[in-house]
Image (spheres, coloured by chain):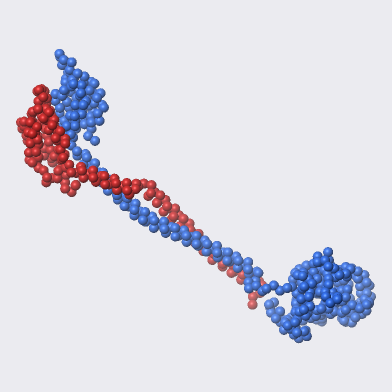
């Protein structure tokens, strides 16, 4: 799989080519697309101290003086660069139509220019000249003392030596020898090294980085160019989570409040029910009290029911059904005494036990009557007048 | 214009304030909720206790009605104080005794506490005396007989008896 492929126009349309063999490829399993530097204009401009959100506006204004194209038909992207304590914007400009063709070719995959591949190396070398040795062109990015920050491009000639000669003219000579960093294919590295070494004295160090290795170091989205702009959201993503949390908290609180409100309502209804329940209970209690008072009155009156001597005599008649005859009978309140003549007063005592009306019945005296089977006996007792 | 650090600090401050507000709100609502639950449990317990003890209104009303009827019936068997006096009562009893063929040997009034009793000494047919006692038993009004003595030693179905008899009264306010 090719990590980075490059685009090249032939027969009127763009195709994808591999750095390894410079052949067109149809496979879509590449990671990113290197656009042709020839299709872009790269301008470097100093940036004044500006808040980040004002930079784009400043650059849009600046472009009018940097680029001759019609503003409506021009698209641009930019990256920030700090070199020797100065801030620069590296602006990439192209015609709108060209970019659209690249977007269609890339099919959503990241797109970049050689500057993206240079960026990871800026920290390593303070002053350097970066060469991107493309099969068809060469880009030069200069970071030289004296504020020389610029990007240049030239088409490759027939021979490498001739290219180098032109490059030397473009670079010029400075007091301080810069570092030379070459981004090239493995195939051309050897030849490039030879040519570069012939330029001995004009550089401090010489570094050769395979293009694919340089690409691997740029695996961060923010370094790619001309990403299709997503719709501006009213609420930035960072704030969305916070807003979501706030809404969740608010809803949770409202639900909690509602549940408390429901409990309040239930408690209120229950209290009202208790009130009416207590009222009806009070009425029941009053009814019960009246009933109890009536029972008491009734009880008092029942206690005053007089003893019925007729009933007592009737009961005695039932008990003494063995032929005994009453000689005398005294009833005073609830005490009674009888004197009677009968055959078996002891048996009578058993019968008295079966009668609820009589209690504490005692056989006081028995006197057999001579010449008779009867006995004269005296019984006393109490009446149970419940 | 705020820098990144200041924006972060402001963000943290805002969230601390939001958390504080929600925290306080949740705390007070939570306390209210606990209080309400306790109150509800208390009221429900009260209602349960009230429900268990009492019979229904219908039962209590029915009971009251029966008691009232019974009481009225019982009260009607008592004389009101102005309805009877000992002498009028004496006439009634005397008439009853005579009607049953009993001869009155003696009769007198006796004061026993607050009550006035009539004491009759009678003699006559035993059956007649029992009929007299039966009439006392079946009287519409309560006639009390705190003392009765019957002597049947004479034989031949005749008895001598001493009867103390009175009548029960009830105040008009007690009716």
Is residue A17 among the parts visible in the rendering?
A: yes
Is residue A88 among the parts visible in the rendering?
A: no
Number of numbered discs:
0
Direction from residue A1 to residue A340 in the image, left or right: left
Write down which chain is painted blue.
Answer: A
Q: In front: A300, or A365?
A: A300
Q: Could you tell me which quadrant the N terminus of chain B lies in? A: bottom right
Expressed as whole percent of the image width and height from the top left, the position of residue A91 reads: 77, 79
Q: In front: A147, or B94?
A: B94
Direction from residue A282 to residue B143 in the image, left or right: left
* The color chain B is rendered in: red
Q: Residue at x 18, y 37 (%)?
A: A306
Expressed as whole percent of the image width and height from the top left, the position of residue A312 reads: 19, 30
Expressed as whole percent of the image width and height from the top left, the position of residue A279 reads: 34, 54
Which residue extends farthest front?
A11
- In the image, residue A15 sits, relative to residue B155, either above or below, namely below
Direction from residue B61 to residue A98 in the image, left or right: right
Res B18 → quadrant: bottom right
């Amino acid at each position: 799989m090719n990590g980075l492929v490059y685009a090249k126009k032939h027969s009127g349309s763009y195709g994808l080519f591999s750095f390894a063999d410079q052949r067109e490829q149809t496979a879509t399993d590449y990671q990113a697309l290197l656009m042709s530097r020839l299709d872009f204009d790269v301008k470097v401009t100093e940036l004044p101290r500006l808040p980040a959100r004002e930079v784009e506006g400043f650059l849009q204004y600046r472009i009018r003086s940097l680029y001759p194209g019609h503003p409506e038909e021009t698209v641009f992207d930019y990256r920030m660069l700090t070199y020797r304590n100065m801030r620069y914007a590296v602006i990439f400009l192209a015609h709108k139509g060209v970019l659209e063709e690249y977007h269609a070719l890339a099919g959503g995959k990241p797109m970049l220019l050689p500057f993206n591949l240079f960026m990871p190396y800026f920290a390593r070398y303070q002053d350097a000249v970066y060469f991107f040795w493309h099969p068809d062109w060469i880009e030069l990015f200069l970071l030289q003392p004296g504020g020389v920050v610029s990007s240049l491009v030239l088409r490759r000639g027939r021979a490498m030596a001739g290219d180098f000669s032109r490059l030397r003219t473009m670079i010029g000579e400075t007091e301080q020898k810069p570092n030379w960093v070459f981004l090239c294919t493995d195939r051309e590295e050897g030849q490039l090294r030879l040519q570069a070494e012939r330029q001995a004295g004009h550089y401090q160090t010489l570094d050769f980085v395979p293009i694919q290795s340089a690409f691997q170091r740029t695996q961060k989205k923010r370094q790619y160019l001309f990403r299709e702009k997503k719709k501006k959201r009213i609420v930035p993503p960072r704030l969305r989570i916070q807003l979501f949390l706030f809404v969740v908290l608010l809803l949770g609180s409202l639900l909690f409040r509602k549940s408390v409100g429901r409990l309040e309502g239930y408690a209120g209804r229950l209290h009202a029910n208790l009130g009416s329940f207590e009222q009806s209970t009070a009425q029941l209690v009053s009814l019960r009290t009246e009933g109890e008072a009536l029972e008491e009155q009734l009880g008092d009156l029942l206690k005053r029911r007089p003893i019925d001597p007729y009933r007592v005599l009737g009961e005695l008649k039932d008990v003494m059904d063995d032929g005994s005859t009453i000689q005398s009978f005294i009833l005073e309140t609830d005490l009674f005494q009888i004197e009677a003549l009968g055959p078996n007063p002891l048996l009578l005592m058993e019968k008295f036990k079966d009668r609820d009306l009589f209690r504490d019945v005692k056989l006081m005296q028995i006197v057999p009557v001579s010449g008779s089977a009867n006995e004269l006996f005296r019984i006393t007792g109490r009446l149970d007048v419940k | 214009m705020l820098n990144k650090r200041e924006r972060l600090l402001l963000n943290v401050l805002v969230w601390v304030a939001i958390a504080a507000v929600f925290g306080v709100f949740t705390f007070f609502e939570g306390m209210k909720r606990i209080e309400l639950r306790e109150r509800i449990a208390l009221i429900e317990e009260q209602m349960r206790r009230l429900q268990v003890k009492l019979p229904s209104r219908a039962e209590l009303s029915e009971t009251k009605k029966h008691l009232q009827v019974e009481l009225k019936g019982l009260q009607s068997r008592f004389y009101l104080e102005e309805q009877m006096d000992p002498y009028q009562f004496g006439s009634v009893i005397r008439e009853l005794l005579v009607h049953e063929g009993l001869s009155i040997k003696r009769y007198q009034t006796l004061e026993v506490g607050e009550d006035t009793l009539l004491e009759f000494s009678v003699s006559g047919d035993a059956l007649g005396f029992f009929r007299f006692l039966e009439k006392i038993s079946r009287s519409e009004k309560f006639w009390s007989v705190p003392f009765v003595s019957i002597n049947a030693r004479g034989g031949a179905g005749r008895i001598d008896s001493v009867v103390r008899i009175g009548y029960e009264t009830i105040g008009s306010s007690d009716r």
